[in-house]
Amino acid sequence: MIRFLLVFCLALSTATNSFAQWFKREEPIMGTRVYVELWWQNEARANELMQQVMDEMERINQLMSPYKTRSELSAINRLASEQAVPVSAELLRLIQTSVRYSDVSDGAFDITFASLGSEYDYRNKIKPTESQRKKAAALINYRDMVLLPADNSVRFRKKGMRIDLGGIAKGYAVDNAIAILQAAGVESAIVTAGGDSRILGDHRGRPWLLGIHNPRGDGQVLKLPLEDVSISTSGDYERYFEADGVRYHHIIDPHKGASPSELMSASVLTDKSIDADALSTTLFVLGTDKALKLANSQPGVSAILIDRTGKVYYSSDLVDPAMQ
Ligand code: AMP
Ligand code: MG
């Protein structure tokens, strides 16, 4: 009888604990807001999973932040002009993926943009002098970054070169987070790091509704019903300051050595967040025509661009809602 009671009580306690529901958590990591929401039947396990997501984000931050002196990325920036710097296979792989995007975009995506990008402090409205800008811009060229996969190391051909993975690392981290949730059996979730989101499954029988921000105001320009997809937006409103009528923002056109001004935002939808992230930054740099051409040439990639007049452009696989 006692055993029966015990089993009954246990069953009751799991029953009260096992109402499947949405669990969510938000934390500031990687200089941005990381958000996870997942559908699960047990609070303790849901908390554990959300913690694993945050831990993975923090692990990648420690590895790849240019602001942490002990990160692998900082070691590259400090030493690679002098010697080949050994790095983890993981970091090397991400750098190789970045190079692939440099190749497909004719250098619009280029992590050596940081040779110049690191001269700006957007929060404190600091920019290089014209001669500093020119000198640093001349150091941007991913082909001067030598990858030595045989001994997992990286070397720069020119002194003063720097790299920064800010245009791709968040997407990579989001993919890793989703992989953790998938492996644990989660079927419905969203993970967001700043402008990079990936959706796993749907919103319990309905799509998720995600918005594309109005680049010059509150609210959203568009709402998109989404499931099982990644979406990334790159915008000129994230980190910027204005001086002498020029908007200095965190995306840099490697060929011009300046922030592009044709678009206010570029959004990309595709399976993996790493691709959406790298491509949204790439399209932003390319500007309307070249961006649409590149998006249309990539299978499984959709793009939504907003130019500086507020006009919205869609890749050829999407239907313009105004035309319906
Ligand atoms: P996102 O918000 O993903 O577009 O990323 C913007 C970030 O990408 C910036 O904060 C920089 O860290 C980085 N970035 C800026 N310009 C470039 C570029 N031309 N190629 C690659 N990364 C860039
Ligand atoms: Mg990006």
Image (tube, rainbow, N blue to C red):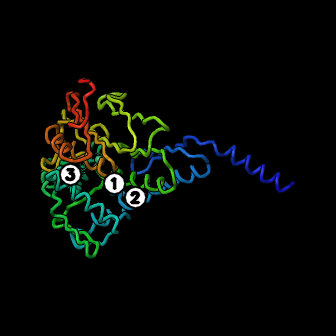
Mark closer to the chain start, 3 or 1: 3
- Residue 54 spot, x, y in % from top left: 48, 53
Residue 249: x %, y % from top left: 25, 41
Question: Alpha carbon of mark 3 to alpha carbon of mark 1: how far?
Answer: 13 Å
Task: State which tag comes first along the sequence, 3 or 2.
Answer: 2
What amino acid type is highlighted by mark number 1?
Ala
Secondary-structure class at tag 1:
helix
For the residues labelled 3 and 1, say whether their Cβ atoms are less than 8 Å apart: no
Give the number of the disc on residue 169.
Answer: 1
> Would you call the spot at circle 3 few (<14 residues within 10 Å), some (14-19), or many (20 or more)?
many
Crowd rating for badge 1 (residues with CA inside 10 Å; few <14, some 14–19, many 20+): many
Residue 306, compared with residue 142, is above or below; it is above
Instruction: Quickly name the residue at label 3.
Output: 109
Residue type, numbered disc 3: Phe
x and y, in percent, of residue 61 in the image = 40, 57
Q: Nearer the viewer, residue 50 or 158?
A: 50
Q: Is residue 100 above or below residue 223?
A: below
Q: Secondary structure at mark 2?
A: helix
The Cα–Cα distance between marks 3 and 2, rounded to whole angstroms, is 21 Å
Residue 127 in sight in this render: no
Sequence-first disc among 1 and 2: 2
Number of residues whose C-alpha sits closer than 10 Å to that of mark 2, classed few (under 14), some (14–19) or many (20 or more):
many
Q: Secondary structure at mark 3?
A: loop
Q: Residue at x 60, y 46 (%)?
A: 41
Residue placed furthest toward the bottom: 151
**In the image: residue 131, left or right of residue 282:** left
The answer for how far apart the CA atoms under marks 1 and 2 are is 8 Å
| Tag 2 residue | 60
From this view, report whether residue 312 is shown above or below residue 31.
Answer: above
Q: Is mark 1 within 8 Å of ligand 1?
A: no
The type of residue carrying mark 2 is Ile
